[in-house]
Each structure stands twice: as structure tokens, then as C-alpha cells.
Amino acid sequence: MKEGILPDLWVAGFTRTLEVHDPERPAEEAWLDPLELEVLRIRTGRKISTVREVALAIGRLGGHLNRKGVGLPGWATLWRGMQTLSVLVEGVRLARKLTHFG
């Protein structure tokens, strides 16, 4: 499990690099673990099959509007998106440990 700011920055940077240089690679090659990718798909309501789609989905979590003429999400937006995704994934992991609630 990734912890802290540096892993999020690493993934954001790697995703940004792939987004620019090889955007049609499979989403599974975007350095997200399978749970992170599945949470991203569910949260965005999109299929997400390429690295470009991963970057745009993470960018949306970070505040990118994905409008025509805006361009691709930048480093800071991807980092914010990774922080949000990390919180969502941690929530899923905690929810799996619940035996009862209320």
C-alpha cells in the first residue's frame, strides 16, 4: 500500500509522462494497483481503458474540468487527484474491515 505524498507524486508524474508520450497504453500500466483503478472507474462512472483516460479521470478528481481548449491535467492537478483517490481507496479498505456498524 502506498503511503504519503511522495508515492502520490511519483504516480502523478509517471501518469503525466505516459499521458504525453504513450497515451494509448492500457490503463493497467498507469502504476495504479487494481483496487485504485477499480475505485477510479466506479467514482468517475467511466470504463477507463487507456493511460490517457486514467490521467483525465485522476485530473477530474483533482479539479480539472476537461473542457475543450483547457488542455490536459498538469502535475499539480494530478497530484491533487491522487490525494483524493488515495482517500477513497483507504475508505474502501476500511469498509472491508467493518463487521457491523450503527
Image: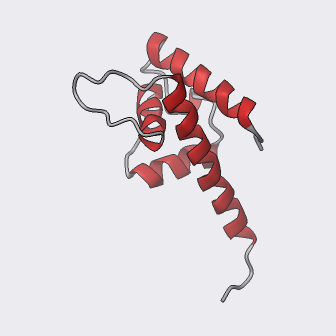
Q: Residue furthest left?
A: 68
Residue at point 43%, 19% (across, down): 23
Q: Quadrant of the N terminus?
A: top right
Q: What is the quadrant of residue 24 in the picture?
A: top left
Residue at point 32%, 21% (across, down): 71
Q: Report the coloring of the rendering.
A: secondary structure
Q: Position of residue 54 (x, y in %)?
A: 47, 34
Residue at point 46%, 30% (across, down): 55
94 or 67, which is in the foreground?
67
Q: Position of residue 68 (x, y in %)?
A: 22, 27
Q: Position of residue 53 (x, y in %)?
A: 41, 32
- Looking at the image, is 69 positioned above or below residue 82? above
Residue at point 47%, 23% (across, down): 74
- Looking at the image, is 26 positioned above or below residue 90? above
Q: How many marks?
A: 0
Q: Quadrant of the C terminus?
A: bottom right
Q: What is the quadrant of residue 90 in the picture?
A: bottom right
- Looking at the image, is 95 positioned above or below residue 25? below
Is residue 55 left or right of 30 when viewed as pictured? left
Q: Residue furthest top?
A: 21
